[in-house]
Image (cartoon, rainbow, N blue to C red):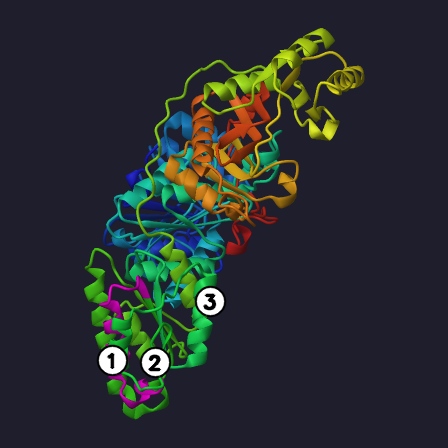
Amino acid sequence: MSLPQAFVDPSSIAVVGATEDRAKWGYWLATGALAGADRRQVWLVNRRAAQVLGQPCRPTVGDLPGTPDLVAVCVPPEHVLPVVRDALAKGCRAFLSITAGLGADEAELAALLHESGARMIGPNSLGLFNAATQLRLAWGNFTPGSLAIVSQSGQLGSEISGLGARAGLGVSRFYSVGNQLDVGAVDVLESLVGDEHTTTVALYLESFADGARIVAALRALRRAGKHALVLTTGASEGSRRLARSHTGSMTSALDVVDAACRAAGALRMASPRELVDAAKVLDATEPPGGRRVAIVSDSGGQGGIAADLATDRGLRAPVFTDRLQTGLRALLPAAAAVSNPVDLAGAGEADLQVYAQVVELVAASGEVDSIVLSGYLGCYGEDSPSLVDAESAVIDRLGDLGRRHRTDAAPVPLIVHSMSAASPAVARLREHRVPVFDTIDAALGALGHVTRLGGRPRPAPVIEPVEAAVPTPGYWAARTFLTTLGVAMPEARRVADAAGFAEACASLRPPLVLKAGWIEHKSEHQAVRTGLGPDTAAAVFREMYERLGPGEYVVEEQDTRPGVVEMLIGARRDRDFGPTVAVGHGGVHAELWRDVSLELAPVDRRTAAGMIDRLRSRRLLDGWRGQPAVDIDALIDAIVAVSEAIAATTGVADIEVNPIRVGPGGALAVDALVVPRTAEVVAQDVPETTGAIGHREPTEKQETSREHVH
């Protein structure tokens, strides 16, 4: 459902629980609402006060002279239901509930809203803010800007806002969605797609129910030219349930969230500070088009540290061409380093304009995608007042450079690290929208993050779900399922007794492999034997049959190709985000190495290749210590096929191919598991009522202070 206009620009507001006590929510909501009184009608409601903040009060919503477009509720938990019933009877259909700790009343509240067609943000919300419409119903104050904050935790959202304000980054909209009883974060995300005042969205979620819709909303934001930065904790609840496959035990909830972010063109951040640092860069420029960074410093030591940190952040400081180095030598002393990093070697102190001249020359070279200027700039005027004007002139020139490159198709962002945190020169850099940081690790950390946002997110491959035949349990059925996908498997026979086994051995090429097909993880149960020849096969079958009993056995030709690398492909359904696919280092030691990369399914060939490239074991596929390179294209084909199968076949819960043996001549799957979706699994796929996971419940009535909400 879309976000009602009442939560964006209401025509009238009623604050229930308004008070003059600054320690209570009613004060902050009332003062915030009255700040927009020249745009909308504001009514205050308090049972025990005839007047609040110089404004008349009514005892109940029902006593108001009109019907409020939006009702903000900040009363003790036991009074929330009566207030909502009264407002619904008045005709109100939009609510903001600050109150937490409703307990059993929350289910009744949800039913009331549903029956009446009303909408609510909260309960347990920190409030909302919209700079463009003068809408402020939250604790605290907000600096207007271009960052939208959508947070399941109100206090964490407030922290992001405060960090942003100190970094010169303001807020366009703020929505604390709280328990998401009705309005969820995804409703707000969808409303931000067309918001002209928002350029970057900060999203904090603890649970990702309706994950596919969240991914679609993040994709829409990216298509609209906006960037999304995501914070989370435990993440996808569904991913904490381990699948029966090995792959499920080797991936975490955060792996799935990261895959969702990659699919949507968003970034998962580790902390509010990291998020604000990245947002500060995005507020000034588009992400750079690549990882090539120029490092310019007035200190060799600082330049060297910056170069090391750049590599650690996934950036690359390429050696400049002879042409560019010659141009730099014309500006700098003979002792200056000009290959990258560039050490000004005192030239900046002799003539401050050298800072700008060097940066301009490097930016125009076409050899880098971004520039980091590190060191003393920003301190000259602070330490030597006679240099204020000269330093300001350089900063104005750098700011002009940033504006010129912001209009280019491929911007070359300039990031400044200054040893001063708050000098007038630093403030002037911020006025020019040049991102400036007081530590080099923060500067390069932010640049490394936003560089990952370059380019557009991949379009979601479209796979129509089908009610295809779901394989019955067992290895033979899994073989049949995979071969229909085009995944190659060894020649094999299904047998049930010694006579059938002897007949199968006669028709297959040794050495052979014997498997108890109904056992899922065969190595752990001694349900697989390899290297069988004419002299040993019968005895091995007899021993296994006597130990494990009757069942569906499979005998197949053993893959003896040289130069083979064992990999695994796994696919499963995450309860929140839907189908996923993973590839990793396979075989019996797969869980020891835990070398896996994961994406939302289905994937195309380009994405599958990227999954392989992220693996630590990637070099084994190119040939290691004299081994031949293997057929990576065949592995990519198998990844794509399995990803499409999990996305399209609604009756399948898990697919695991482990190992798939990849050699110079192709890929051959030699063990597999396909798990049907049982009625129990399908039931688990239904999202639970969304709650504020990790939020503490109040021990006293909500009426007192903001601490009783978050």
181 or 228: nearer the eye?
A: 228
Q: Distance between the residues labelled 2 and 1?
A: 9 Å
Residue at image mark 3:
309
Question: In the rendered image of this protein, does residue 12 appear above or below residue 448?
Answer: above
How far is disc 1 from disc 3 in space, using C-alphas?
26 Å
Verify CB contact (< 8 Å) between mark 1 and mark 3.
no
Q: Locate residue 392 relative to residue 666 in the image: left or right.
A: left
Picture coordinates of residue 80, whole percent (x, y): 48, 39
Q: Find numbered disc 1 in the image and state the secondary structure of the residue it sits on.
A: helix
Q: Position of residue 462 (x, y in %)?
A: 34, 28
Q: Name the residue under label 1.
A: 394
Judged by depth in the image, the label closer to the viewer, 1 or 3, is 3
Kind of element beneath mark 3: helix
What's the residue type where badge 2 is placed? Answer: Leu
Which residue ends up furthest to the top in the rendered image? 499
Residue segment shown in magenta = 343-370
Q: Distance between the residues labelled 2 and 3?
A: 20 Å
